[in-house]
Image (tube, helix red, strand yellow):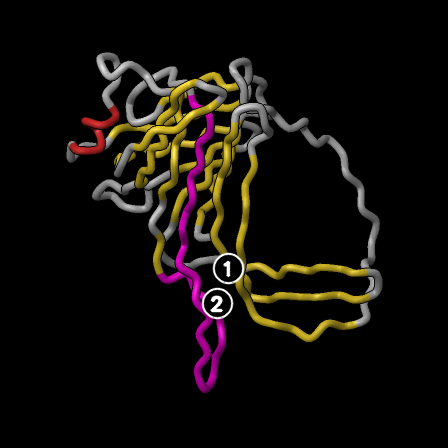
Amino acid sequence: VGLSETVVSSTSVTYAPVSASFSSCTIYCFYDLTRHKITGARGTVTFNLIAGQIASADFQFIGLYNAPDSTDMSGTWTLANQAAGIEVNDTNVTTATFHGETSQRIESFDLALNNELVYKETASSKQALIVNRSPGGTAVLEAPDTATTDYFAKAVAVATGATDIILGGTAGNIVRLKADQTDVTGVSYGDNAGVRSLNIPYLALPTTAGNNEMSLIFT
């Protein structure tokens, strides 16, 4: 999905965007004795945090078609040491900063890489490619008093702010989603259980260094 992986042993794993040397994968799907396979797959991902639900990542891939074959799933599968999913709530979210504003009452937040995926075939090759990306998403917040935080002014201003959300407080089961240059592109009103909310679309922009629109950090 166009992310690098940086591992600090026994400490952290960080994923961040790259602009070249995109890795690919093979995806298998087994239906009884029928195996489906996509090779050279590349994709995009959207990270979702919704209050009252377990955080999730939704993937979309394209790749090279392979004819299904009659192959059973082989090997022994053992699932162990799997940390429990963490619900997005006031207890588990330890940092909720959006566009530089701390302790925001986030009802939902998503961040999509928005990779542009294409399938390209020539006389001597065929491959799935990532040709562009435009990371961003939407934050839905319980509407603050504009005297405290004016998101309408933020949408008009040509300025970015840092977004930082940390879910979990136990080492080995903490995830941090950052977008250091969040650019608010609009604001509209919503309603959640009779309480006014703001729907705020945004872009996650890079600095001049590049490849730093966002990062996903496990610790």
Residue sitting at x 46%, y 70% = 119
For residue 203, say whether it is visible: yes
Q: Nearer the viewer, residue 51 or 182?
A: 51
Residue sitting at x 44%, y 37% = 110
Query: Residue 86 falls in which quadrant of the image?
Result: top right
- Residue at image mark 1: 42
For residue 181, say whether it is visible: no
Q: Position of residue 180 (x, y in %)?
A: 31, 32
SS for tag 1?
strand
Looking at the image, residue 103 lies above or below residue 118: above
Query: Residue 129 falls in which quadrant of the image?
Result: bottom left
Residue sitting at x 55%, y 13% = 91
The answer to whether mark 1 and mark 2 are in CB contact below 8 A is yes
Q: CA distance from mark 1 to mark 2?
A: 6 Å
User: Is 217 positioned to the left or the right of 84 in the image?
Assistant: left
Please report the bounds of the magenta region as a residue range. Answer: 106-131
User: Is 213 positioned to the left or the right of 62 in the image?
Assistant: left
